[in-house]
Image (tube, rainbow, N blue to C red):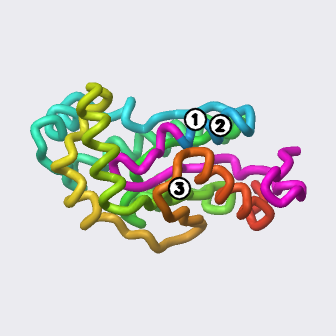
Amino acid sequence: MLRNNVAGHPAAEPPQCIIIMGVCGCGKSTFGRKLAALYGIDFVDADDFHPASNVDKMKTGKPLTDEDRWPWLHELAGLIGTYQTHGKRVVMGCSALKEAYREILRGQRAGSMLFVLLQPSQAELLKRLKERTRIGGHFMPASLLESQLATLEPEGKNIIAIQGDGDAEEMMATFLSHCNALPKPV
Protein backbone atom coordinates (compact mmCIF):
# COMPACT_ATOMS: atom_id res chain seq x y z
CA MET A 1 0.00 0.00 0.00
CA LEU A 2 1.25 3.47 -0.83
CA ARG A 3 2.00 5.62 2.20
CA ASN A 4 0.92 9.21 2.13
CA ASN A 5 4.12 10.97 3.18
CA VAL A 6 2.40 14.33 3.41
CA ALA A 7 -0.05 13.53 6.18
CA GLY A 8 1.50 10.25 7.34
CA HIS A 9 -1.69 8.25 6.72
CA PRO A 10 -2.11 5.27 4.41
CA ALA A 11 -3.32 6.32 0.99
CA ALA A 12 -6.17 4.65 -0.82
CA GLU A 13 -5.24 2.27 -3.59
CA PRO A 14 -4.94 4.14 -6.89
CA PRO A 15 -7.68 3.82 -9.48
CA GLN A 16 -6.91 1.59 -12.45
CA CYS A 17 -6.22 4.64 -14.60
CA ILE A 18 -5.08 8.08 -13.50
CA ILE A 19 -5.10 10.65 -16.27
CA ILE A 20 -2.95 13.72 -15.71
CA MET A 21 -4.71 16.40 -17.72
CA GLY A 22 -4.44 20.06 -18.61
CA VAL A 23 -3.23 22.47 -21.24
CA CYS A 24 0.17 22.41 -22.91
CA GLY A 25 3.04 23.16 -20.56
CA CYS A 26 1.16 22.33 -17.34
CA GLY A 27 3.50 19.44 -16.49
CA LYS A 28 1.46 16.38 -17.48
CA SER A 29 4.44 14.28 -18.55
CA THR A 30 6.78 15.25 -15.72
CA PHE A 31 4.13 14.82 -13.02
CA GLY A 32 2.72 11.69 -14.65
CA ARG A 33 6.09 9.95 -14.79
CA LYS A 34 6.74 10.78 -11.12
CA LEU A 35 3.31 9.52 -10.09
CA ALA A 36 3.68 6.31 -12.11
CA ALA A 37 7.09 5.69 -10.53
CA LEU A 38 5.63 6.31 -7.06
CA TYR A 39 2.89 3.71 -7.63
CA GLY A 40 5.23 1.38 -9.57
CA ILE A 41 2.99 1.34 -12.66
CA ASP A 42 3.32 2.27 -16.33
CA PHE A 43 3.22 5.82 -17.67
CA VAL A 44 1.79 6.50 -21.13
CA ASP A 45 2.16 9.85 -22.88
CA ALA A 46 -0.92 10.39 -25.07
CA ASP A 47 1.10 12.74 -27.31
CA ASP A 48 2.97 9.66 -28.57
CA PHE A 49 -0.28 8.40 -30.11
CA HIS A 50 -1.19 11.49 -32.16
CA PRO A 51 -1.25 10.72 -35.87
CA ALA A 52 1.33 12.56 -37.97
CA SER A 53 -1.42 14.79 -39.40
CA ASN A 54 -2.26 16.09 -35.90
CA VAL A 55 1.40 16.68 -35.04
CA ASP A 56 1.98 18.51 -38.33
CA LYS A 57 -1.07 20.68 -37.72
CA MET A 58 0.06 21.62 -34.22
CA LYS A 59 3.63 22.29 -35.37
CA THR A 60 2.27 24.92 -37.74
CA GLY A 61 0.35 26.59 -34.90
CA LYS A 62 -3.13 25.37 -35.89
CA PRO A 63 -5.34 24.11 -33.07
CA LEU A 64 -6.84 20.65 -33.38
CA THR A 65 -10.57 20.32 -33.95
CA ASP A 66 -12.83 17.77 -32.33
CA GLU A 67 -12.75 15.85 -35.60
CA ASP A 68 -8.93 15.70 -35.36
CA ARG A 69 -9.13 14.42 -31.80
CA TRP A 70 -11.88 11.75 -31.97
CA PRO A 71 -9.78 8.93 -33.54
CA TRP A 72 -6.87 9.71 -31.20
CA LEU A 73 -9.14 9.62 -28.13
CA HIS A 74 -10.73 6.34 -29.21
CA GLU A 75 -7.26 4.80 -29.63
CA LEU A 76 -6.32 5.97 -26.13
CA ALA A 77 -9.58 4.56 -24.71
CA GLY A 78 -8.72 1.23 -26.33
CA LEU A 79 -5.29 1.30 -24.74
CA ILE A 80 -6.80 2.03 -21.31
CA GLY A 81 -9.20 -0.88 -21.88
CA THR A 82 -6.26 -3.17 -22.63
CA TYR A 83 -4.64 -2.23 -19.33
CA GLN A 84 -7.93 -2.88 -17.55
CA THR A 85 -8.43 -6.24 -19.28
CA HIS A 86 -5.00 -7.34 -18.08
CA GLY A 87 -5.70 -6.10 -14.54
CA LYS A 88 -2.94 -3.50 -14.74
CA ARG A 89 -2.94 0.11 -13.57
CA VAL A 90 -1.64 3.00 -15.67
CA VAL A 91 -0.95 6.71 -15.43
CA MET A 92 -1.56 8.61 -18.66
CA GLY A 93 -0.64 12.18 -19.55
CA CYS A 94 -3.39 13.49 -21.83
CA SER A 95 -4.80 16.98 -22.35
CA ALA A 96 -8.41 15.69 -22.01
CA LEU A 97 -9.57 19.30 -22.23
CA LYS A 98 -13.33 18.73 -22.62
CA GLU A 99 -15.69 16.58 -20.61
CA ALA A 100 -16.76 14.94 -23.91
CA TYR A 101 -13.13 13.84 -24.43
CA ARG A 102 -12.99 12.47 -20.89
CA GLU A 103 -16.22 10.54 -21.47
CA ILE A 104 -14.58 8.76 -24.42
CA LEU A 105 -11.55 7.93 -22.29
CA ARG A 106 -13.77 6.68 -19.44
CA GLY A 107 -15.85 4.39 -21.62
CA GLN A 108 -17.56 2.05 -19.16
CA ARG A 109 -14.81 2.52 -16.56
CA ALA A 110 -15.95 5.68 -14.74
CA GLY A 111 -15.41 4.28 -11.24
CA SER A 112 -11.90 3.06 -11.98
CA MET A 113 -10.58 6.31 -13.44
CA LEU A 114 -9.37 9.54 -11.89
CA PHE A 115 -8.45 12.79 -13.65
CA VAL A 116 -5.83 15.09 -12.11
CA LEU A 117 -6.04 18.59 -13.59
CA LEU A 118 -2.80 20.56 -13.35
CA GLN A 119 -3.51 24.32 -13.39
CA PRO A 120 -0.46 26.59 -13.26
CA SER A 121 -0.98 30.30 -13.93
CA GLN A 122 -0.95 31.51 -17.52
CA ALA A 123 2.35 33.34 -16.88
CA GLU A 124 3.95 30.11 -15.64
CA LEU A 125 2.57 28.17 -18.60
CA LEU A 126 4.06 30.68 -21.05
CA LYS A 127 7.41 30.54 -19.24
CA ARG A 128 7.46 26.75 -19.43
CA LEU A 129 6.44 26.67 -23.09
CA LYS A 130 9.12 29.18 -24.06
CA GLU A 131 11.74 27.16 -22.19
CA ARG A 132 10.54 23.93 -23.79
CA THR A 133 10.68 25.54 -27.25
CA ARG A 134 14.15 26.92 -26.55
CA ILE A 135 15.52 23.47 -25.79
CA GLY A 136 13.59 21.84 -28.65
CA GLY A 137 11.52 19.64 -26.39
CA HIS A 138 8.04 19.50 -27.93
CA PHE A 139 6.03 20.00 -31.11
CA MET A 140 3.37 22.16 -29.43
CA PRO A 141 4.10 25.87 -29.87
CA ALA A 142 3.25 28.44 -27.20
CA SER A 143 0.91 30.10 -29.71
CA LEU A 144 -1.62 27.30 -29.11
CA LEU A 145 -1.92 27.97 -25.38
CA GLU A 146 -4.79 30.46 -25.82
CA SER A 147 -6.87 27.98 -27.84
CA GLN A 148 -6.26 25.27 -25.25
CA LEU A 149 -7.23 27.55 -22.37
CA ALA A 150 -10.41 28.51 -24.26
CA THR A 151 -11.23 24.82 -24.84
CA LEU A 152 -10.53 23.63 -21.28
CA GLU A 153 -13.59 22.54 -19.32
CA PRO A 154 -12.20 22.14 -15.80
CA GLU A 155 -15.39 20.72 -14.28
CA GLY A 156 -16.45 17.11 -14.57
CA LYS A 157 -16.55 13.67 -12.93
CA ASN A 158 -13.67 12.34 -10.82
CA ILE A 159 -11.37 15.36 -11.13
CA ILE A 160 -8.81 16.53 -8.59
CA ALA A 161 -7.50 19.99 -9.48
CA ILE A 162 -4.01 21.05 -8.49
CA GLN A 163 -3.55 24.79 -8.82
CA GLY A 164 -0.37 26.78 -8.53
CA ASP A 165 3.01 27.28 -10.11
CA GLY A 166 4.97 24.74 -8.07
CA ASP A 167 7.33 22.15 -9.44
CA ALA A 168 6.44 18.46 -9.77
CA GLU A 169 7.41 17.77 -6.15
CA GLU A 170 5.04 20.44 -4.83
CA MET A 171 2.24 19.18 -7.09
CA MET A 172 2.90 15.63 -5.85
CA ALA A 173 2.59 16.76 -2.22
CA THR A 174 -0.76 18.38 -3.07
CA PHE A 175 -1.92 15.25 -4.88
CA LEU A 176 -0.91 12.99 -1.99
CA SER A 177 -2.83 15.19 0.41
CA HIS A 178 -5.95 14.16 -1.57
CA CYS A 179 -5.09 10.45 -1.60
CA ASN A 180 -7.35 9.43 1.25
CA ALA A 181 -10.27 10.69 -0.85
CA LEU A 182 -9.33 8.65 -3.93
CA PRO A 183 -12.04 6.36 -5.19
CA LYS A 184 -11.28 2.65 -4.80
CA PRO A 185 -10.88 0.76 -8.10
CA VAL A 186 -13.84 -1.38 -9.10
Place of residue 179 in the rendered image (x, y in percent of width and height, measured from the top left): 75, 59
What element does badge 1 sit on? helix
**Separation (CA) of disc 2 from disc 3:** 22 Å
Mark 3: few/some/many CA within 10 Å (<14, 14-19, 20+):
some
Residue segment shown in magenta: 1-30
Of callouts 2 and 3, the N-terminal one: 2
Image quarter where the C terminus lies is bottom right
Which amino acid is tagged 3? Gly
What element does badge 3 sit on? loop
Circle 1 residue:
33
Give the image quarter of residue 183: bottom right
Vertically, is 173 above or below 87? below
Q: Is residue 42 magenta?
A: no
Q: Are marks 2 and 1 in contact (CB under 8 Å)?
A: yes
Front residue of 107 and 129: 129
Residue in view at x 56 percent, y 58 percent: 115
Circle 3 residue:
107
Vertically, is 143 above or below 133? below
**Separation (CA) of disc 2 from disc 1:** 5 Å
